Amino acid sequence: MPMTLSAAAQAPTLKLEQDRDGPAVETLLDHAFGPGRFTKVSERVREIAEFRQDLSFCAWDGVRLVGCVRMTRISIGGAQAVFLGPLAVEADVRKFGTGGALVQAACAAAQVAGFANVLLVGDEPYFGRFGFSAAPAKAVRLPGPVDQRRVLVKPLREGGTEGLEGLVAAPLT
């Protein structure tokens, strides 16, 4: 039975993901997505990408992990970018805007790190409020079948999406 946040709490605390958080993150992701998560095109991207722990965040209610977002470094047609996902939040803390806070924290960290774009596969009605759109991602190709309307990008600087096209691949060194 899941615990709920204490009445005094406003929202979970966000912290950069640490090495020791890995098992708890995997448990949360298994609970949120089930074994089917390993068959998605997003997982193909994560298999070839470089995990960026310094851009990935966990949401905590005391010692309980209640949310996470991970970022990986990719290349899109030769241009450096980051891929956002997976994003998972326990149902009982979604009312606090935990998912949005995780997305915003990860995007802000990617911007500070100098990336021009964040790419993800998701629902535009949800992610659109954080600046993601399918339009600039129309020429981006993922390594597997995907509904192109769900491929979204957020520019992190002026002109960041200009000429953004090509295959998502392992990051260039």
Image (spheres, helix red, strand yellow):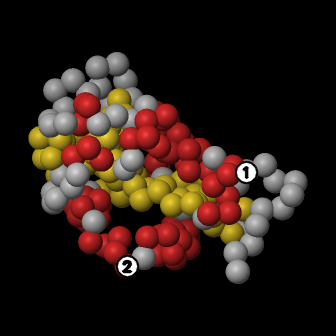
Taking 166 as reference, is 131 above or below it? above
Q: Position of residue 29 (x, y in %)?
A: 47, 70
Image quadrant in which you'd find residue 46: bottom left
Q: Residue 4 vs residue 22: left or right?
A: right
Q: Position of residue 122 (x, y in %)?
A: 37, 50
Amino acid at the residue labelled 2 = Pro
Q: Position of residue 98 (x, y in %)?
A: 62, 50
Provide the secondary structure element on which disc 2 rests.
Answer: helix
Number of numbered labels in the structure image: 2
Query: What residue is shown at x 49% (from left), y 69% (from top)?
Result: 32
Q: Residue, x 35% and y 29% (percent of image)? A: 155
Name the amino acid, label 1: Ala
- Specify few, some or many for label 2: CA neighbours under 10 Å numbering under 14, 14-19, or 20 or more: few
Q: Is residue 72 above or below residue 43?
A: above
Q: Earlier in the sequence, mark 2 or mark 1?
A: 1
Q: Which structural element holds mark 1? A: loop
| Residue ID for mark 1 | 11
Q: Which residue is mark 2?
A: 35
Label 1: few (<14), some or many (≥20) within 10 Å? some
Q: Is residue 8 visible?
A: yes
